Structure formats: C-alpha cells, structure tokens
Image (tube, helix red, strand yellow):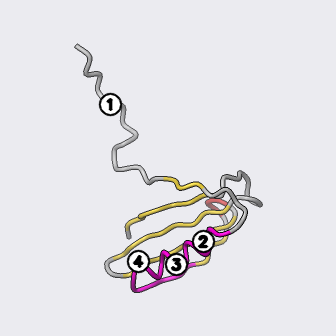
Amino acid sequence: MEQRKHWWNGKWGRLARRDVFLRVDGDRWHVEQRAGGAEGVSQFYEYPSAEEAEETVRALLAGADGWRELSPRPPGSWLPTPDTRA
C-alpha cells in the first residue's frame, strides 16, 4: 500500500490531534481518519476510484481546523546530502 497524501489538523496531544491519510493499493483507494495521534482510533474507508476517495477527504477536511498537508518523505531523504563545494 502506498501513501499518497497526509493531512494533520496542526494540534498536538492525544485529545486534539487528528490525521487524514489517502493511500492506494493496486486499484483500490483507502482513506483513514485518525483521532488521537499514532495510538489513536481510526476509521477506514475503501473506494474503487481516486475521485470517490478524494471526495471523502474533502468532506473530512471541511471545518474550522487549520489542516496542513504533510508530504511523505521519499526513501533515503533523511540522509545528509554530500558536500559538493570544491
């Protein structure tokens, strides 16, 4: 399963934090709505198309929270870059 997008409501703590994830696995699209951080409670939705999954994401992100999109890091992106100065 590949994570395509991740949104966070910008709040810290188990009681306030909410996350929404958009993932794809083959031809199936998955949306996860999580409350409470990494150890929180999740609700899962599955769709046959990206359009249907994105519609659910838009509905979940509607409201007063200051949602921020978090970009997934490509593999190895945490490694330091070589110094190319000569």
Span of residues in magenta: 44-62
Check if residue 53 falls in the magenta segment: yes
Q: Which of marks 4 and 3 is nearer the N terminus?
A: 4
Q: Mark 4 points at which residue?
A: 50
Q: In the structure shown, which secondary structural element does the residue marked by tag 4 occupy?
A: helix
Q: Which of marks 4 and 2 is nearer the N terminus?
A: 2
Of 15 and 6, the residue lying toward us: 6
- Of tags 1 and 4, the one toward the viewer is 4
Q: Which mark is residue 38?
A: none
- The answer to which quarter of the image holds residue 59 is bottom right
Question: Which quadrant would the C terminus be assigned to in this image?
Answer: top left
Amino acid under label 1?
Thr
- Residue 27 rendering spot, x and y as whole percentages: 33, 81
Location of residue 80 with respect to 41 vertically, above or below? above
Q: Name the residue under label 3.
A: 55
Helix, strand or loop: magenta stretch: helix
